């Protein structure tokens, strides 16, 4: 009986451990899907460009800071308050080093070019696309897909956007064209209230200055749900099945 009881206890602990692992994975999936990732970006340009990006998740359990300068940049990652990186600035190749590295990596002209193998993957892909495009519910599927994309972008939409910029192209006519193009795009997209662009018609040289602040949340659940609903739609399921077969 002792050996039987010991075996049952071991089996029970294995089952409890597996259930705990499954529950932990489910909890992690729920957190990833429905707990938003917060981000904040500050950027400016007035002669030189600077930017500061902060990303945090789960009450700063994961915290990432990226500080950009034109001469150097710095990345800091913290998990549960523990700093993971050494804080060293990422190395940047100078133009001379980059050209030297590119020259070394460039293949020799004398080297024989490898023969391209003919595969049917491209042909199969084009055939599948042609079948999907000829689907009788193509217009309905395109409309449903566009609606899913728009709903998905709500999970990425910033809560606050404040951008003030000034531009001068050295020629009043070109500056006017740039401002006109901005007004058209801003009217279509609808961010005119968040972005202010002024033109300098007396500038002798082309320039752009800006001061930007963007803050918001990335909700992976909100971004994924529209596509999950899209796949469950009957016309979409039929076109996926047709493409696979």
Image (tube, helix red, strand yellow):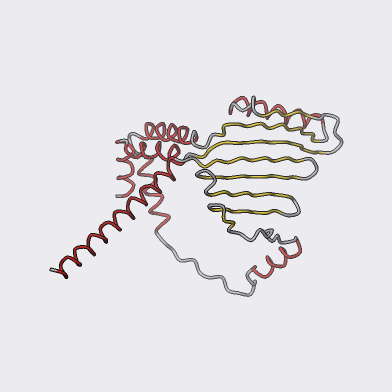
> Along the line of sight, which residue is nearer the eye, 20 or 171?
20
Labels in figure, total = 0
Q: Is residue 129 above or below residue 114?
A: above
Q: Quadrant of residue 215?
A: top right
For residue 98, side relative to residue 59 (left or right) = right
Q: Is residue 224 placed above or below 185 in the rendered structure?
A: below
| Rendered image quadrant of residue 98 | bottom right
From the viewer's side, name the closer residue of 115 and 214.
214
Residue at point 41%, 31% (across, down):
143
The front one of 22 and 158 is 22
Tell me where residue 119 appears, x and y as whole percent: 42, 62
Locate the N terminus and report the quarter of the image it occupies.
bottom left
Q: Position of residue 35 (x, y in %)?
A: 46, 41
Give the percent coordinates (x, y) of residue 161. 63, 32
Where does residue 69 sit, x and y in percent of width and height? 73, 50
Rendering quarter of residue 151: top left
Q: Classify residue 146 as left or right of residue 197.
A: left
């Amino acid at each position: 009986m002792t050996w039987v009881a010991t075996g049952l206890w071991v089996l029970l602990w294995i089952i409890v451990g597996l259930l705990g692992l499954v529950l932990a994975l489910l909890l992690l999936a729920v957190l990833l899907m429905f707990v938003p990732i917060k981000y904040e970006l500050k950027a400016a340009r007035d002669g030189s460009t600077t930017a500061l990006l902060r990303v945090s998740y789960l009450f700063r359990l994961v915290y990432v800071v990226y500080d950009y300068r034109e001469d150097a940049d710095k990345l800091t990652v913290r998990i549960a308050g523990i700093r993971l990186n050494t804080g060293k600035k990422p190395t940047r190749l100078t133009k001379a080093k980059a050209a030297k590295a590119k020259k070394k990596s460039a293949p020799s002209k004398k080297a024989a070019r490898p023969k391209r193998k003919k595969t049917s993957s491209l042909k199969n892909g084009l055939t599948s696309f042609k079948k999907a495009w000829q689907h009788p519910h193509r217009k309905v599927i395109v409309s449903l897909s566009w609606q899913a994309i728009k709903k998905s972008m709500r999970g990425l939409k910033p809560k606050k956007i404040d951008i003030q910029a000034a531009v001068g192209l050295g020629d009043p006519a070109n500056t006017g064209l740039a401002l006109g193009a901005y007004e058209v795009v801003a009217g279509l997209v609808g961010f005119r209230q968040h972005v202010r662009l002024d033109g300098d018609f007396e500038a002798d040289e082309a320039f752009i200055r800006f001061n930007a602040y963007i803050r918001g949340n990335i909700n992976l659940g909100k971004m994924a749900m529209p596509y999950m609903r899209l796949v469950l739609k009957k016309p979409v399921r039929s076109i996926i099945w047709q493409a696979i077969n």
